[in-house]
Image (cartoon, rainbow, N blue to C red):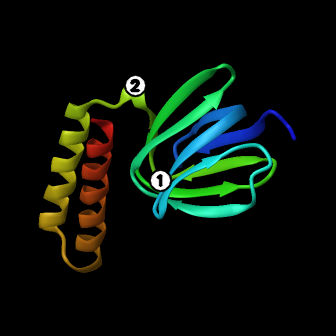
Amino acid sequence: MADTMQFDLVSPERKLASGQAVSVLIPGADGDLTAMPDHAPVVATLRPGILVVEMEGETQEFAVTGGFAQVTAEGATILADEALPKAEVSTEMLQERIAEAEAARDAAEGALHDDASKRAADLAALLDAMV
């Protein structure tokens, strides 16, 4: 059994992390999942929350709003809708983004209303996970 596995965290804007990880705590839509080396293959949908990675001798935390996780025996790849290092996320920033999403929701109709409602709910869930 290997001691580490390849870990990659990617959002549409950038690659946030890549390296050898000991474990990855993934906020899954169906419950939290801890991926470790030689894990059984699984694909999971992410819920808004905090992704915790033990990598290169330290613990790193990232705020994610959703996306997908692919775990294999060799590693874990996280494709996040949005992700930031937790240290870069403040309560005030999230509250502003929630207000923007709610304003967009109130101004939208049909499918755009549904998308904006989901975004506002995802951001509110992330805010709850931060405290």
Measuring from the top left, give residue 23's x and y in whole percent.
Answer: 65, 38
Q: CA distance from mark 2 to mark 1?
A: 18 Å
Q: Amino acid at mark 2?
A: Ala
Residue closest to the eye, 20 or 117: 20
Looking at the picture, tell me which residue is in the foreground, 64 or 93: 64
Q: Where residue 29 sits: x, y (%)?
A: 45, 62
Q: Quadrant of the C terminus?
A: top left
Residue type, mark 1 in image: Asp
Other-residue count near label 1 (Cα within 10 Å), few / some / many at <14 / 14–19 / ≥20: some
Q: What residue occupies the far top of the structure in this picture? A: 57
Secondary structure of the residue carrying numbered label 2: helix
On screen, 20 above or below 111? above
Q: Is residue 84 left or right of residue 97?
A: right
Residue 2's mark? none
Task: Give the labeled residue for mark 2.
Answer: 87
Of callouts 2 and 1, the N-terminal one: 1
Residue at the spot x=23%, y=80% of the render? Answer: 110
Where is residue 4 drawn, in percent x and y? Answer: 78, 34
Residue identified by numbered label 1: 81
Determine crowd level at label 2: few under 14, some 14-19, many 20+ residues with C-alpha closer than 10 A. few
Q: Looking at the image, which residue sits at the far bottom?
A: 110
Please name whichever residue, 28 or 13, is drawn nearer the observer in this view of the structure. Answer: 28
Residue pictured at 85% horizontal, 37% vertical: 2
Relative vertical location of residue 109 with respect to residue 11 in this rendering, above or below: below
On-image quarter of the N terminus: top right
Mark 1 element type: loop
Of residues 131 and 68, which is closer to you in this image?
Answer: 131
108 left or right of 73?
left
Q: Residue drawn 29% across and 64% down?
A: 118
